[in-house]
Amino acid sequence: METDTLFIIEEKSDTSGNRPDTPWVRFDFLAKVFNMGGHSMPEDAKAFYQPIISRLKEYFETIPNQTVTFHFEFVYFNSSSSKMILEILELLPENSTVNWYCRNGDEDMFEAGEEFKPILDKELIFNIKMKWFLKALRNTEALFFIDWFLRYLQF
């Protein structure tokens, strides 16, 4: 769904219908707050991310020198998605805030955030934040978590 102020893409499941293979995307252009997260492993990352990158480029051209806040809440992304995420980071205006969220104990996502910081050739406020529970946790993962939690409590 796209309007003047919102750009939303819902996550899509893989061919077996199990785990989403594309991330969810929620951009609020009016508030200058951008959110992406979940799983990102589309078969053609460039094709998936192209409309997102185009929309961001178009928007940032209209607000030169203004900062935005971008929240990344990925559970997993593959190497081709990593390249597209880096491209998005490089589009952000100077001094924008990036909040890179990862689940508590998820060293891979923590390290991914750490690796992006020195690659960028612009000044961004780059925060890496550990969370106990992500909004990105959906459907099958949520059921798995609830099952595990109940077993942990021995219900």
Image: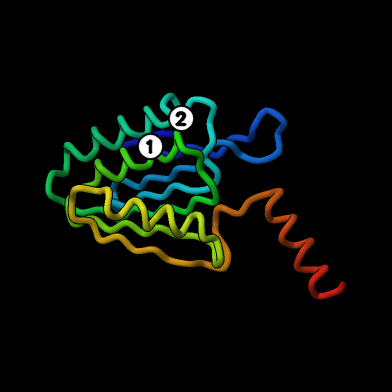
Q: Position of residue 35 (x, y in %)?
A: 41, 50
On residue 32, the disc is none
Report the side of 153 relative to 69 (left or right): right
Circle 1 residue: 83
Q: Specify few, some or many for label 2: CA neighbours under 10 Å numbering under 14, 14-19, or 20 or more.
A: some
Q: Position of residue 92 (x, y in %)?
A: 24, 46
Residue placed farthest to the bottom in the image? 153
Residue placed farthest to the right in the image? 155
For the point 43% across and 66% down, the residue is 129
Residue placed most toward the observer, 109 or 99: 109
For the point 24% across and 33% down, the residue is 58
Name the residue type under label 1: Lys
Residue placed farthest to the left in the image? 65
In this picture the colour scheme is rainbow
Circle 2 residue: 45
Nearer the observer: mark 1 or 2; the answer is 1
Report the side of 80 relative to 31 (left or right): right
Residue placed most toward the observer, 55 or 49: 49
Q: Is mark 1 in CB contact (under 8 Å) with mark 2?
A: yes
Residue 61 location, quadrant: top left
Q: Position of residue 148 (x, y in %)?
A: 77, 63
Q: Reply above or below: 82 against 145.
A: above
Question: Which mark sits nearer the N-terminus, 1 or 2?
Answer: 2
Q: Reply above or below: 11 against 94.
A: above
Residue placed most toward the observer, 122 or 2: 122
